[in-house]
Amino acid sequence: MYSLVSENQDTISERVSSFWVHLHFTIQNRNAPVRLDAAHVAVYLTYDFSEPELKKRHGHVPFPGNAAPMVRLDIIGDQPTTTLGITRASLVRKITIRRSNEVGELLFFKIADPGGAVSWLETENWGPDIDDPQENEDNSQFLPLRITLGDAENGGIANRFVHELAMDTSNAGLKRLAVVVDMLGKPLLAQVTAAALAGATFPNFSIIPVNANLTEVIGAKIRTSTGYAMGAVGAFAHIDADILLSDWNTNNPDVLLDKLSRVLFAPGNVAGPGPDDPAGPDRLVRKLHNVGDTSRSDSQYLRHIENVREVLYIEAAGNGRIANEIQLG
């Protein structure tokens, strides 16, 4: 569970069960600086509909208008080094769902000028301790992949465990690439932001199978492309993975908000075992006939999801290619 705190240290909510951060970028060509197109942040607050819980509901977050249009937000986790700072945030939309046993509120923010002179994202106090998986749940072994991005001695990352690598290749070469990792210290979001603010090209990166004599340096070859870096936890971690991550390659706020709403509320995103009932659904699927069911609450389930996942997605423009065909095995 996370808290949302304003710039004057007022606690907006202690019930942030889920958050999502999205940064869209453009790579104009191999030699041009990476351009930041748009950045958005969403938080989902969940409460049991009871007197003690309702007293912990969030404070007022103003919409742009007569009030200050931009605010600073800190997303603060329960563990040490789990604080993200978000600057220049404006509340765009708020969706509230109240049912008999719960209240859910989706707050959707846009970031003003993410490519400005000062970073919109502060990650100095973000660095959760997450162990790399050593084997699958059935104890079977696997050959892990690791990603290195930028210069590790000058702020880059080295040998970060890759949960998933998805590649779409045509006869022209690599068309689409998606990488899923844990959001650790020096996150991908911060790496892309830092490159843009420095007027640099997209950072070189390599994806390396451990104990294999194969290294692919992809970043140096990237051609005209668009893409995004995205962090997600809680309900937002129900986003489809694999090449379906292409659905999030947009900087349109209306499209992003619609997709977030579907992730939160669509039945296809709530099935599966839960922490308290491994044989049953993790969240109650809401239909018109059962919106008043008090047997299960989002706030009880979502607070159990802690590890933040991060995505790097790149897609070639038009009929072009990101790079030549990549072979990893």
Image: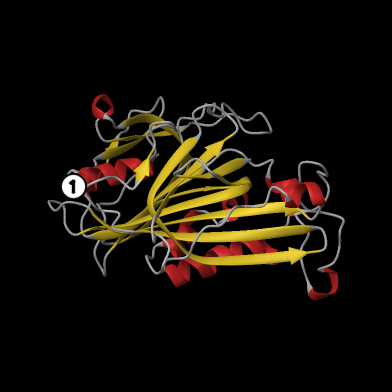
Number of marks in the image?
A: 1
Whole-percent x, y for residue 206 in the image: 30, 37
**Mark 1 sits on what residue?**
201
Q: Residue at x 59, y 49 (%)?
A: 18
Instruction: State the image coordinates of residue 191 (x, y, percent, origin top left).
Output: 31, 41
Q: Quadrant of residue 266?
A: bottom right
Numbered disc 1: secondary structure: loop
For the N terminus, the quadrant is top right
Give the camera-side residue of 126 and 8: 8
Q: Nearer the viewer, residue 227 or 192?
A: 192
The percent position of residue 327, horizontal first and vertical second, equals: 34, 44
Report the side of 199 relative to 160 (left or right).
left
Does residue 177 appear anywhere in the picture? Answer: no
- Dot 1: within a 10 Å radius of its alpha carbon, few (fewer than 14), some, or many (20 or more) residues? many
Q: Residue at x 76, y 63 (%)?
A: 285
Quadrant containing the C terminus in the rendered view: top left
Q: Is residue 216 above or below residue 49?
A: above
Q: Residue furthest bottom?
A: 288
Residue type at mark 1 is Thr
Q: Is residue 65 above or below residue 173?
A: below
